[in-house]
Amino acid sequence: MIDIPQRHQGKRPRVTIVDVANGAGVHVSTASRALNPGTSHRISSKVVRKIEKVAEQLGYKRNTLASSLRTQKTGTIGLIVPNLSDPLFSPIIASVEERVAEDGYVTFVANSDYSPVKLRSIIERMSSQFVAGLVVASFELNDPSVELCLELGIPTVAVLRDPRHPRMSSISMDDVSGVQALVEHILDLGHRDISYVTPPLAASTAQNRLAGFNAATRLAKAAGCRFDVVEARAYDVAEGERIMAHMLASGLTSTAVLAFNDLLAVGCLVALKSAGISCPEQISLTGVNDLPFMNMLSPPLTTLHTAGRDLGLEGADLLMSLIKNLSQPIKRVLLTPHLVLRGSTGPVRKRGSDADPSPVAVQSGAITG
């Protein structure tokens, strides 16, 4: 038997949805959806029965006026990104806002700071505000927040990062083929000693780009080429500068360095310039994402163009379809990046020739940051 809450002595208080949620051990939004005939189908029948039983025991009476206001939705879409300061996410945010506005929705944007705990908290908060759906660019692989979205019955689409969940649709870039194209470009320039800088492999983007690097280098290894994988701790310029300084101090033989993203590549370029090492004459350098102003660096950065605007538009379009019809099949859409060749990559120079600056002194073997 559930105890009826006693807020005032001698007076039986009105039982609220919060009381029902606490009694059933679920989130308030889950209880609300379970007791609403229009949304109860989004939650497992077992959970619905449990919540209904608690509501009956407590004598809960549904406030149909308030409920109707909520279930009309609030005309809002939640958009969660891992880092608002990263310019990668600006076109995603802008295009999601643009697309959902066509259907009369506005967008609430939140920053998860690459924290699974913060991501879960944001999803719960947005759910309690009755957002009509979510576009999430913060999911890691095997992220428990995916199950939370499914439990809450919120239409959700993953963009950029694919959590690879069988019940979650996603729009992402074909990072595997993209990085393969980068490596092949570097090999075509004659480089045979190449390093790749990767962040921790918690997200699909990191895993897929490393898979592309490994796939492209597999045959080249048999031909005597040398490849290192260097692990960074973060995704930003400061970490790129730190990791390149560490590589140089450890002795770097590589004539080309491929960075996971443009921000890491910019940091690597800063460290190379500080050390007096020319790019691309001594070391060629590449990034991924083709962020604004990468063409204005000295030298301009060779990179992969990953279409942030298309990711946002496709993700928002898919979400609008899900809101209108939750029974739609799961989709996994891969967009194709393209190579942008600029001045940070060039032919390998034969060491010891007049055209080649003094090589960087090196220690062989993989380096971890």
Image: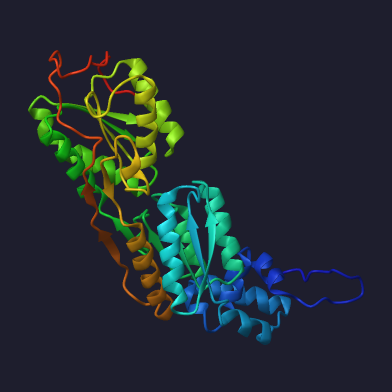
* Residue sitting nearer the eye, 267 or 281: 281
Q: Residue at x 30, y 40 (%)?
A: 287
Residue 170 versus residue 204 in the image, above or below = below
Quarter occupied by residue 129: bottom right
Q: Is residue 297 visible?
A: yes
Q: Quadrant of the N terminus?
A: bottom right
Farthest residue, direction right: 10
Q: Position of residue 295 (x, y in %)?
A: 31, 44
Camera sees residue 199? no
- Please give the name of the residue rendered at 48% of the width and 78% of the height, measured from the top-left corner: 41
* Image quadrant where residue 218 sits: top left
Above or below — where is 275 with respect to 301?
A: above
Judge by depth and name the residue closer to the eye, 84 or 74.
Answer: 84
- Where residue 291 appears, x then y in whole percent? 36, 48
Taking depth in this image into account, of 280 and 43 the one nearest to the observer is 280
Relative placement, left or right, of 351 versus 79 is left
Above or below, 189 against 357 in this view is: below
Q: Quadrant of the C terminus?
A: top left
Q: Residue at x 57, y 67 (%)?
A: 127
Where residue 100 appears, as percent x and y from the top left, is: 45, 73
- Location of residue 103 in the rendering, given as x and y in whole percent from the top left corner: 45, 79
